[in-house]
Amino acid sequence: MLLMLKCWADFPGYEQFVRDKWGSFTIEGWGAYVLKEKLKLIKGSLREWHQRHSQNLTGKYNMVKERMSILDIKGETSSLDEEEVTELHDLSVNFHSLS
């Protein structure tokens, strides 16, 4: 059974990873056999991908939270430049995807 966790779609690069992996499998045979074999292969690839992207979530979460705090404090005393505003936005998106 192929299982997809809803949170995976929030990880940057997930969709492209699945597309690239699915397209990289070369299986010959009749349609149902090809589908079955590709599903088996993608399941193994997703298992590895999940382990790489979900390890140390607490550490990643704390690191993002700390950097956001630094930028917030800086924003209270002076204005953030465009790059810092973009970073803060990206950190916010990352923070929610890790939550």
Image (cartoon, helix red, strand yellow):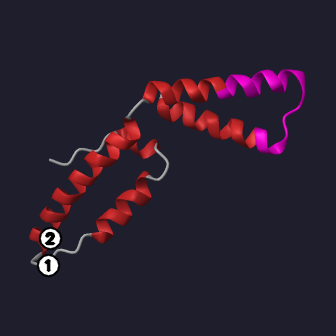
Image height of 92 relative to 10, above or below:
above
Marks 1 and 2 close (CB-CB < 8 Å): yes
> Left or right: 97 with respect to 49?
right
Across and down, in percent, residue 88 comes to: 70, 35
- Secondary element type, mark 1: loop
> Dot 2, how many residues are within 10 Å of its Cα: few (below 14), some (14-19), or many (20+)?
some
Q: Residue at x 59, y 37 (%)?
A: 93
> Left or right: 32 with respect to 47?
left
> Left or right: 27 with respect to 84?
left
Q: Is residue 91 magenta?
A: no
> Left or right: 65 with respect to 21?
right
Q: Which residues are magenta?
A: 67-84
Residue type, label 1: Glu
Figure quadrant of residue 80: top right
Image height of 25 relative to 88, above or below:
below
Q: Which mark is residue 28?
A: 1
Across and down, in percent, residue 84 comes to: 77, 39
Residue type, label 2: Val
**Label 1 vs label 2: CA separation?**
6 Å
> Dot 1, how many residues are within 10 Å of its Cα: few (below 14), some (14-19), or many (20+)?
few
Q: Is residue 74 magenta?
A: yes
The residue lying toward the viewer, choosing from 27 and 67, is 67
Across and down, in percent, residue 54 comes to: 38, 36
Image height of 2 relative to 18, above or below:
above
Q: Earlier in the sequence, mark 1 or mark 2?
A: 1
Q: Which mark is residue 89?
A: none
- Figure label count: 2
Label 2 belongs to which residue?
A: 34
Figure quadrant of residue 86: top right
Q: Residue at x 38, y 34 (%)?
A: 55
Q: Residue at x 46, y 42 (%)?
A: 10
